[in-house]
Image: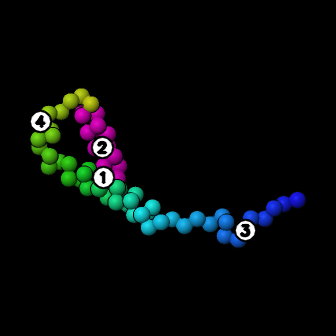
Amino acid sequence: MRQHSPPGAGRTRLPWWGAALPVLAFTLLLALLLGGSEAGAAQQAESPAGEVIAAVLERVANALLG
């Protein structure tokens, strides 16, 4: 015997911030990537880990921007 779920039980509504927060986070991270070349003070004190992170971010930016 199959039990039927009540109408509308499978539907969930996404709150406005559920869509807005990922878009905002992506926009802010993209702005950091594009504006990161102006940070001269950060480039003076690079560590080996910083160089790896910078290389990864550069590859991601190149992949996104073509």
Amino acid marked by disc 1: Leu
Q: Quadrant of the N terminus?
A: bottom right
Secondary element at tag 1: helix
Tell me the tag on residue 44: 4
Q: Earlier in the sequence, mark 4 or mark 2?
A: 4
Quickly name the residue at label 2: 57
Side of 4 where 52 appears, left or right = left
Q: Is residue 2 above or below residue 62?
A: below
Instruction: Verify CB contact (< 8 Å) between mark 4 and mark 2.
Output: no
Q: Earlier in the sequence, mark 4 or mark 3?
A: 3
Along the line of sight, the residue nearer the viewer: 57 or 24 = 24
Side of 53 where 19 appears, left or right = right
Crowding near the residue tagged with mark 2, few <14, some 14–19, many ≥20 C-alpha atoms within 10 Å: some
Task: Determine the residue located farthest toward the right in the rendered image.
Answer: 1
Q: Main secondary structure of the magenta part?
A: helix
Secondary element at tag 3: loop
Q: Earlier in the sequence, mark 1 or mark 3?
A: 3
Quickly name the residue at label 1: 29
Q: For the residues marked 2 and 3, what is the alpha-carbon distance in whole angstroms? A: 48 Å
The magenta segment is: 50-65
Q: For the residues marked 4 and 3, what is the alpha-carbon distance in whole angstroms? A: 63 Å
Q: Is residue 48 above or below residue 61?
A: above
Q: For the residues marked 1 and 3, what is the alpha-carbon distance in whole angstroms? A: 42 Å
The percent coordinates of residue 45 (x first, y second) are 14, 33
Q: Earlier in the sequence, mark 4 or mark 1?
A: 1
Q: For the residues marked 4 and 1, what is the alpha-carbon distance in whole angstroms? A: 22 Å
Amino acid marked by disc 2: Leu
Of labels 1 and 2, the one closer to you: 1
The percent coordinates of residue 22 (x first, y second) are 40, 57
Amino acid marked by disc 4: Gln
